[in-house]
Image (cartoon, grey):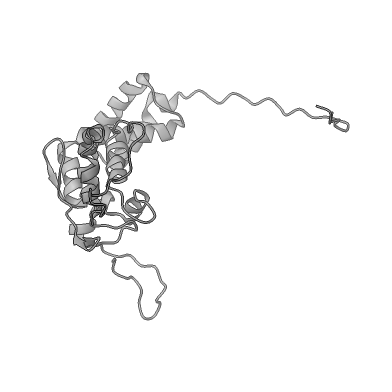
Amino acid sequence: NLPSPATPANPSAFARVQLPPDRRAGLLGQAGILTVTSYPNRTSPVLRGKFVLDKILGTPPPPPPPNIPSLAEHADGSAPTTLRSRLELHRSNPSCASCHALIDPIGFALEHYDSLGRRRESDGGQPIDSAGRLTTGEAVNSPVSLSTVLATARPDEFHRNFARTLLTYALGRGLDYYDRPTIDKIVATAAARNHTLPAYIDAVVASIAFQNQRPDSPRAPAATTSGPVAFNLNN
């Protein structure tokens, strides 16, 4: 449900498309993000909510307890018509409720987009209810409102996670407790430049951790043989 960039003269051409700002604004409205956080045959508010918490904010939810049951059905055996109603039944399990209260409202805000990132208005023949309320109290119902809440209510978590992600990539290793001062300095330096991407990159490159990396140990030369190699077939 995206506008086609094709023209009669060249129907297969790629062209820049202006996406609706009230529906597709920001990273969370991108079809690629919406697709990789879905299953092949349906969306997953859980995967989408976990993606935002883990990859955007750097606050991953706890792992699920063992032996989690599948999405339940109604007592009379008839399955609920929408994925949201199935998840609400799932949340009635006390062992699942606390984490799903954290994850699901985020994923529900993205439910107007199917497993390929296409805009939709119904699920299972029923109108989609994308409204949710985060555990911190903010109401969300779309990628735009969710992005706005994250940018205004939780900017510090995003900025620190963004700095951690860039530094991890730049160093080629995981981070540890002794990298926290470096993260603090990167975020502070970027804040002085309005948190632009070039500001973060410059701060990472200028960091002591980046400029004083330990070189890789030289590899020992591979052993060579001058004659035929014998194999003991009895072992």
Q: Position of residue 33 (x, y in %)?
A: 33, 50
Query: Which quarter shows the C terminus?
Result: top right
The quarter in which the N terminus is drawn is bottom left
Name the side, left or right, on which 8 lies relative to 188: right
**Is residue 222 rendered to the left or right of residue 87?**
right
In the visual, does 210 lie left or right of 80?
Answer: right
In the displayed orientation, state which residue is furthest to the bottom.
Answer: 8
* Residue 116, picture quadrant: bottom left
- Residue 93 seen: yes
User: Can residue 106 be seen in this snapshot?
Assistant: no
| Residue at 85%, 31% in the rendered image | 229
Would you place residue 234 above or below residue 7 in this image? above
Outermost residue to the right: 227
Between 19 and 54, the residue placed more toward the observer is 54
What residue is drawn where x is 54% and y is 25%? 215
Q: How many marks?
A: 0
Name the residue rendered at 41%, 71% in the picture: 13
Q: Quadrant of residue 226?
A: top right
Q: Quadrant of residue 206?
A: top left
Which residue, as the protein is rendered here, is positioned at the far top? Answer: 178
Farthest-out residue, front: 76
Residue 35, given in percent of the width and then of the height, sits at 35, 53
**Of residues 213 and 125, which is closer to you in this image?**
125
Residue 41 picture location, percent across and down: 37, 56
Residue 46, image x and y in percent?
Answer: 29, 43
